[in-house]
Image: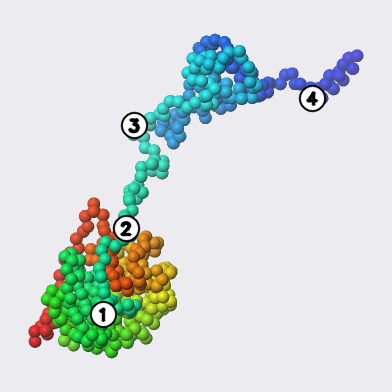
Amino acid sequence: MSHFGFENDVHNVLRLDMPITNAPMARWQRKASTSSSTSTNSLSPNRSVNSSVSLSKTPSKTPGKNSKTQNTPSKAGGDRFIPTRNNKQLDVASFLISKENEPVEETTSSTPNQKAWSVTLNGYDIEEAKILHLGGKPLNAPEGYQNNLKVLYSQVPTPVSIKKSRYISSVPERILDAPDIKNDFYLNLMDWGRQNLLAVGLTSHVYLWDAGAGDIVLLKKMEDDSEYICSVSWSKDGNFLAIGTSDCKVELWDVQYQKRLRSMDGHLARVSCLCWNDHILSSGSRSGLIHQHDVRLADHHIFTFGGHTQEVCGLTWSPDGKYLASGGNDNMVYIWPVTTGSEYQAIHALNEHQGAVKALAWCPWQPNILASGGGTSDRHIRIWNANSGSCISALDACSQVSSLVFAPNYKELVSGHGFAHDKVIIWKYPSLSKVAELEGHEDRVLNLALSPDGSTVASVAADETIRLWKSFEKDAVKKPKRPPPLKAKPSNFFFLFQFLHI
């Protein structure tokens, strides 16, 4: 019998479906027993409960979490907010979690009574409570504590984000009439001088408009009605105006006395562009030649640049006076150096444009940067490095580019367009992202000119109007620095006046 009893015991041990009597209690059993004891002893609304007993039996931390991870870190002022919860809130959370999987029991008590008991015991209605009810205020950081993360997550707006973008009006500030202006893409018929005088060539006449006083003066009229004005350009100080004509002459006028000082010959075709560099006046003609005139000398012609095979329609000196840029109907852009010797070769010949290049502009704050614009066959704006001759960037303007000018107040580039948009566009430099479009002209824009203070750009178009766009006015809060007055050197025009009095 003993042997049979021993085999029976071994067989019972090897059976896996038998309950293990000496094993510890399973986790789900512990949780069930804990929740049932908590709910029967402290949170049942049908019996009165001693709050002191409930608080003593309720654990002070979340089950399954050790004290190191649950308690607030000893180092105050961390980057997390850990709310403070009292024991009563943890009791409610435990009760609501255990209540979710239990069937709803119908009670004889009315709903208002249950709500009243809940409010009396817990301070709020359990049915409307959240599982975790946050309360209390975050701990204050100790005195002298500096949070390094505040730099990354600070909500204080930076000056860039609160800076308001300026308002650019879509309508011109003023519109002037330009009757009988010659609709010729290759001519340069408008320039704005340092004395705030706007010079405009209208067929056989040259008019001056005083932008400050509003007065209009007729400066010149061609003697032969069949001849016409081709170009105008102010000297750097704004006291003298150079005029190129269709009869191959370059005239120099004293604006203050409204008197012609001299007429300079030498070209064999019309003079379509002019530009000053101190006492040197450069003139480009339909013959493709660029003459350099020293207006101080009786024999004014000093040398000639010859590179273009067709009409020279764009001419401009760099702000530092080191380079002369020329554009022509042969789709070429040449950059010429200041020279006093016998070598008159261009340092760069830029041939990436596919149309006539009339629009040329040097960057005032980067003297080695040149912007050029192509005609109808090209329609591109290109930015060049004059030192290396490389094209920095190019933009398809989708329209004929007739004129370019840099606006230094906001470091922007302004372009005037002909076919097919007939408008003025402001671009941010150097990204060439579009800032605004100024519409209003009913025919192609011929020329642009910037006011001496840089706040207004004037556009003259084939619709016989001049529109003034005040799009670059500086912030009134910031007082602009006054540029030092430009004093003309007495020797620059000394011989010129001496020559006239002979």
On-image quarter of the N terminus: top right
Give 228 or 245, whichever is nearer the viewer.
228
How would you rate the neighbour count of disc 3 (Cα within 10 Å): few for under 14, some for 14-19, many for 20 or more? Answer: few
Q: Element at badge 4?
A: loop
Q: State left or right for residue 458 relative to residue 492.
A: right
Residue 476 falls left or right of residue 389: left
Q: Residue under circle 3?
A: 143
Residue identified by numbered label 4: 17
Q: Can you tell which quarter of the image residue 27 is in?
A: top right
The residue mark sitting in front, 2 or 4, is 2
- Looking at the rendered structure, the kind of residue marked 1 is Thr
- Callout 2, which amino acid? Ile
| CA gap, disc 3 and disc 1 | 80 Å
Q: Are marks 4 and 1 in contact (CB under 8 Å)?
A: no
For disc 2, the marked residue is: 168
Q: Which mark is residue 203?
A: 1
Label 1: few (<14), some or many (≥20) within 10 Å?
many
